Amino acid sequence: MKLHFLGAARTVTGSMHLLEVGQHKILLDCGLYQGRRKESYKRNRNFPFSPADLDAVILSHAHIDHSGNLPNLVKQGYKGPIFTTHATAHLDNIMLLDSGYIHEKDAEYLNKKLKKRRKELVEPLYTKEDAARVSPLFSMTHYGQSFEPVPGVKAHLVDAGHILGSAAVVLDIEENGRSFRLWFSGDIGRPGLLLINDPVLPSKADYLIMESTYGDTKKRDPDAAFIELKEVVQRTIHRKGRVIIPAFAVGRTQELVFGLHQMIENGDIPEIPVFVDSPLAIRASQIFSQHPECFDEETRQFIAEDKHQAALGFDRLQYTLSVEESKRINYTTPPFVVISASGMAETGRILHHLKNNIEDPRNTILIVSWQAPHTLGRRLADQETDIRIFGKHYRRRAEVVTINGFSSHAGQEGLLAYAKATQDTVKKVFLVHGEPRGAEPLREKLIGAGFKDVLYPEPGAEFDL
């Protein structure tokens, strides 16, 4: 058996690992590499294998850095099954279409500039039409349900506790008289996240491929983050202001909505309007509501006892799908909360909410996720006061609060616990989906804990197992 690390090796995007078992080939994830425009385009367009030669794809979850290059894979000749959970397939249907739309618009914008300079035009990596061709290939499975992606390999998925439908991939392999288990973690969640179950820990694995994104970080308790959220909302309500939250459409938005729902039901905050103003987030929330089998016991109990019989629905919650509905939010009497995309405040409707509210000291801009350098979200998190939006300068007078602790990734302690769960049997641990600052400290901790062979593969590295 050969294992090739073709993406998310020494970086955190573009998850893609190729497994050769006899004459058969299985691809674990097919994510978009995200980085500088030219490098990203080249890496995502050119696979280091022939897509038509693959026998099966197994997808851990719907985040774009794990699934976002599936349309290109299909476009270049892959026709086999894509095994994943029901919830992941349903989320990915909307996320890939959205991604295709973005690629089309990016190419359209770039080509306007290139045309003026009489340079060669570019094609989008893929289109919405390309993305739509992925859906018929999904082969949906339940957690724990056995399937055979290729002869000699029995597989099943277990809950990774990261986002709705996320899974670790368990492969029980027989090859040349040998039997062994390969466990691919996907992205590892952490205990105590709202809505979804805790991650299932690995067992009896001979080889473990696991993420290392936050292998250097101690994570805050999610409960502490929601206590801080409650205090921020209470403070803003007291001064009759508006809470503006840039949030990722899948996962973070739904956590915040459920947390605010709980606060209202518990009487921690009054029944103020809460707006979810992102078409993708709205569609994702509908899919969350269609998959209660992915909810944890606490969420199911809350739904059973709640007068609305819903986690993501309550009297003052409004999902604003149209542009007209979005514009009307600005004329609503505060206090209220707006949750809108994008998570780093670079595109989308959140920009309009920021420009309309950034100069009012009664308002709060709430940052709830990591912000990449050079983004508007980072400038806000850094407490800058001169803010440029749509080419116009604004004086930031609104309070800016950053709350850490909402991350759906395990920190160092969670990652160590994950690996230690199968320490008695594991022969090799491969650390992926992490930059050196996250992976190297985790590797040192694992070796210190008695793990004999902990590897941090280079891009393109190949191993015989």
Image: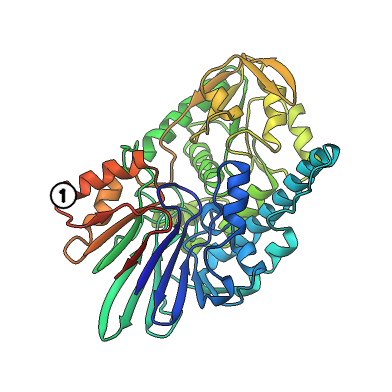
Residue 269 against residue 454 in the figure, above or below: above
**What is the quadrant of residue 356 in the picture?**
top right
Where does the image place residue 421, in percent across and percent down from the top left?
23, 59
Between residue 67 and residue 365, name the one nearer to us.
67
Q: How many marks?
A: 1
Where does the image place residue 207, in percent across and percent down from the top left?
28, 66
Residue 161 visible at all: yes
Between residue 205 and residue 158, name the one nearer to us.
205
- Indicate left or right for 195 with 464 as reference: right
Where does the image place residue 328, in percent across and percent down from the top left?
78, 33
Query: Residue sitting at 32 percent across and 52 percent down?
Result: 456
Between residue 405 and residue 370, name the one nearer to us.
370
Where does the image place residue 304, in percent across and percent down from the top left?
48, 57
> What kind of residue is marked 1?
Ala
Query: Residue sitting at 21 percent across and 56 percent down?
Result: 420
> Which quarter of the figure is the C terminus placed in?
bottom left
Pointer 1 residue = 449
Q: Secondary structure at mark 1?
A: loop
